[in-house]
Amino acid sequence: MASPTLLMRVVASAYSVAEKAATIVRNVMATGDLGIVEKTGANDLQTKADRLVQKSICASLARKFPKVTIIGEEELPPDEVDEELIEDGHCEEILKKTCPAQYTGIKEEELVIWVDPLDGTKEYTEGLLDHVTVLIGIAYGGKAIAGVINQPYYNYEAGANAALGRTIWGVLGLGAFGFQLTEAPAGKHIIVTTRSHSSALVNDCISAMNPDSVIRVGGAGNKIIQLIEGKASAYVYASPGCKKWDTCAPEAILHAVGGKITDIHGNSFQYNKEVKHMNSAGVLATLRNYDYYASRIPSTVKQSLVP
């Protein structure tokens, strides 16, 4: 067998790094002291878990892949990272898969990794633990090509002895793994949208879709999981606020199973390292039937959101 390509090694490492991150997230919660800091206000929080997980992910990946650009959500001082935060393992299963041909020649310096150490921080602080994800997105040529989403509390309502957590991963051209791909009920328009960042614009856009129901949850990673597991048919967010580290990993996984994500105008997201971090023109994502939802976005909404 040929030695694994760089991309598959990065994904295999990101998988183990995300599992380590989940353990940190659960350990911080178990201590009861979340160390909450407000960043820009009451809906923009950072906890001790956000800080420790980002250090763990960035330092672990930087040690193995020193020339890769890694961009994390939290602005942290470049301290020495505690050795116990470093994860140097990798997922053997991933290394056994064949890298899609178009990505076999990638060099380290061509990759950009976008990290959201804890997506759904507000929900984490409120105990809505199933909303929380750890996101590691891998981009090449400005496109999201691979991603890892860990849900630290997957299964947490199944009782004291249930195995907690799961890791979903995907590579464009290879597929996505760790979950059961399911389509939303045919003919139903179930919209998943923001829980804590709603606005008149967000609601106008959703009304225009004629939804049968609307699910309001935290976390971009969580919303994409609703799409790929058939609980929702579209993720609609007509507002700035979502950032590149929120969408990179979910985009790669959604695209790997034939879904589509864009801004409200239909533009693709760019993930090269120079790009601005904010997705200022919102998010529209579906597993199927993207055109139906895109065609129903009111022009007033589009005019209000400048890419």
Image (tube, rainbow, N blue to C red):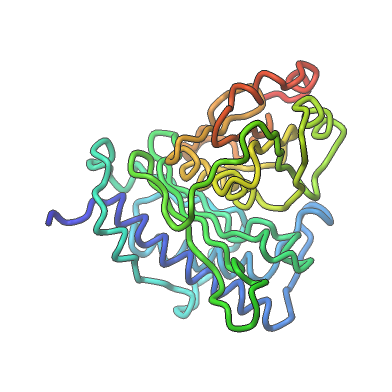
**Place of residue 114 in the rendered image (x, y in percent of width and height, measured from the top left):** 50, 49
Q: Quadrant of the C terminus?
A: top right
**Place of residue 160 in the rendered image (x, y in percent of width and height, measured from the top left):** 64, 83
On the picture, is 36 further left or further right than 55?
A: right
**Place of residue 244 in the rendered image (x, y in percent of width and height, measured from the top left):** 57, 42
Q: Quadrant of residue 15?
A: bottom left
Q: Quadrant of the N terminus?
A: bottom left
On the picture, is 243 further left or further right than 59?
A: right
In the displayed structure, would residue 108 be above or below residue 271?
A: below
Residue under the point 64% across and 56% down: 119
Q: Quadrant of residue 210?
A: top right
Residue under the point 76% across and 67% down: 125
On the picture, is 114 further left or further right than 109?
A: right
User: Residue pushed farthest left?
Assistant: 1
**Place of residue 251 in the rendered image (x, y in percent of width and height, measured from the top left):** 51, 41
Residue under the point 79% across and 52% down: 40
